[in-house]
Image (tube, grey):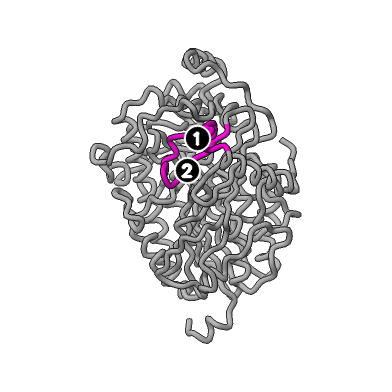
């Protein structure tokens, strides 16, 4: 495609979404282990945001915030349930693009759109949820789906999801027993490429959504053996003393058998996590290569982002919790394409609910109605060096959590509950009760319903080891940030959908 043709055509959009990818897990961030040459190359062609944050450290709420440009307290989708996903009558990025004549495609994890939204706005839907669940389902896809819904570990068989023992979080000491081409990361890339090959004259939007490196932390060869667990640097902030921190974080540290794992076993889980990231990087590379071969790369805006982060070894944990540690709320964010400066790294604070307004402005399309996010196009143009003074995030449902228990007897209680209700019972503490956070000026304050407040001075305590919310020396700072957070919460047009 020549330059004049490109200038006269609307830009396409390729959104590459990953799940639980920690913000610094890239070679370009000088990570000692991560193998990400294709995403590094993508970042070199565009602008990378080193201080990007999510609106919620939970998949569904964060993704809905991305597409609506709204905080959870406005869009009301505080859970991963399908009834909390983007509705057909709810203003979102896909509604704007569809109205502008875009062909919309989805390949990968959903946790974003209701079935009716897919039916009304998308012309291509290949969906995966712990295996492929919609679209061109092949025999190999069924094998992967069955494997991921048949956890053979005794501890994890006690939790049933839709009548099956869903492959749970924790140590899976062997590779996923399938060839690369059969595994869902490769299949998602294959589906995405098929959508690209079907393009005609209309502009397109492709939501290429990889479920990994979210749990279950399992990956096929050669990715499983790509990182030697014994060669990993020491785990960050482990062992961790949870005294003085909210009880729900202590509960998370005991869930999924993490209190039983040795350091070597934790390293094995982390090595698998890095293998998942490397597999995704190769899959992204294959999609970008085909985009170029089809002559679409020069006229396509590309966004790479995660819905939220992951402990990725910090505190000896993998996964997430109902908290606001930087490992969970900071996200990778790269934008490249026409109108985006190349080779830049911005340290301006942005939120993922700013991305949809920014994309629409780059596309010269009308602004998203009711959006609370703000376009950072002036930042990309070099007209300003900052964007947000404060970052807000929230998580949890309106149901009050159970009261904290005696930590000395908690292990016995945990065993009783697991035997009765399965390993996933701990979600009662982690996700019940609204929690909210404000982060600004190198400080972070979090309010947790029915639990301890948190205050961290990030310059002196970047790993958030010392909760100083109860220290009289910081009472003024705590009150100042609490007031700002409460004002934000109480003035928000709060919406609650049905459970």
Residue at the extreme bottom of the image, as rendered:
4
Circle 1: is it few (<14), some (14-19), or many (20+) Cα within 10 Å?
Answer: many
State the quadrant of the C terminus.
top right
Residue under label 2, please give it: 457
Circle 2: is it few (<14), some (14-19), or many (20+) Cα within 10 Å?
Answer: some
Q: Position of residue 25 (x, y in %)?
A: 38, 50
Residue at 42%, 41% in the rendered image: 461
Visible in this render: residue 394? no
Q: Quadrant for residue 399, please give it.
A: top right
Q: Position of residue 93 (x, y in %)?
A: 65, 60
Residue 12 lies in the magenta-colored region: no
- Can you tell which mark lies on residue 468? 1
Q: Position of residue 88 (x, y in %)?
A: 73, 54
* Mark 2: secondary structure: strand
Q: Position of residue 230 (x, y in %)?
A: 24, 37
Q: As drawn, is 219 to the left or to the right of 489?
A: left
Residue at 54%, 73% in the rendered image: 383
Residue at the extreme left of the image, as rendered:
231
In this figure, what is the number of numbered marks? 2
Q: Quadrant for residue 433, please give it.
A: top right
Magenta: predominant secondary structure element? loop
């Amino acid at each position: 495609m020549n330059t004049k043709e490109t200038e006269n055509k609307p830009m396409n959009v390729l959104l590459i979404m990953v799940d639980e990818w920690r913000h610094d897990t890239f070679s370009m961030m000088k990570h000692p282990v991560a193998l990400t040459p294709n995403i590094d190359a993508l970042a070199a062609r565009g602008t990378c945001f080193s201080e990007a944050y999510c609106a919620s450290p939970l998949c569904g709420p964060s993704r809905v915030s991305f597409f609506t440009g709204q905080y959870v307290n406005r869009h009301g989708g505080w859970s991963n349930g399908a009834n909390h996903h983007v509705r057909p009558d709810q203003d979102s990025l896909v509604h704007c693009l569809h109205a502008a004549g875009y062909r919309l495609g989805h390949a990968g994890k959903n946790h974003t759109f209701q079935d009716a939204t897919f039916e009304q706005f998308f012309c291509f839907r290949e969906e995966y949820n712990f295996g492929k669940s919609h679209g061109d389902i092949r025999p190999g896809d069924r094998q992967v789906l069955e494997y991921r819904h048949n956890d053979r570990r005794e501890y994890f068989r006690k939790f049933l999801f839709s009548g099956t023992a869903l492959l749970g979080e924790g140590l899976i000491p062997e590779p996923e027993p399938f060839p690369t081409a059969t595994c869902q990361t490769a299949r998602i890339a294959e589906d995405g490429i098929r959508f690209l090959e079907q393009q005609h004259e209309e502009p397109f939007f492709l939501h290429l959504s990889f479920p990994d490196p979210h749990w279950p932390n399992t990956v096929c060869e050669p990715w499983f053996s790509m990182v030697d667990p014994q060669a990993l640097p020491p785990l960050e902030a482990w062992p961790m003393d949870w005294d003085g921190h909210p009880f729900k974080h202590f509960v998370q540290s005991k869930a999924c058998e993490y209190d039983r794992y040795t350091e070597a076993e934790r390293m094995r889980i982390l090595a698998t996590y890095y293998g998942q990231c490397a597999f995704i990087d190769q899959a992204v590379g294959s999609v970008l290569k085909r985009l170029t071969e089809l002559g679409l790369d020069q006229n396509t805006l590309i966004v790479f982002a995660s819905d939220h982060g992951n402990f990725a070894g910090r505190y000896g944990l993998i996964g997430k919790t109902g908290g606001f540690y930087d490992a969970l709320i900071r996200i990778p964010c790269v934008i490249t394409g026409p109108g985006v400066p190349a080779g830049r790294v911005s340290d301006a604070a942005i939120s993922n609910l700013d991305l949809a307004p920014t994309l629409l402005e780059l596309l010269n399309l009308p602004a998203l109605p009711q959006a609370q996010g703000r376009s950072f196009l002036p930042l990309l143009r070099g007209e300003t060096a900052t964007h947000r003074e404060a970052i807000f995030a929230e998580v949890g449902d309106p149901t009050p959590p159970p009261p904290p228990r005696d930590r000395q007897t908690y292990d016995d209680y945990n065993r009783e509950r697991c035997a009765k209700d399965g390993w996933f019972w701990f979600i009662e503490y982690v996700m019940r009760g609204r929690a909210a956070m404000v982060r600004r000026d190198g400080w972070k304050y979090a309010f947790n319903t029915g639990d301890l407040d948190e205050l961290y001075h990030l310059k002196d305590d970047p790993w958030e080891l010392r909760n100083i919310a109860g220290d009289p020396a910081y009472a003024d700072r705590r009150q100042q940030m609490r007031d700002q957070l409460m004002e934000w919460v109480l003035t928000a047009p709060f919406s609650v959908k049905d459970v």
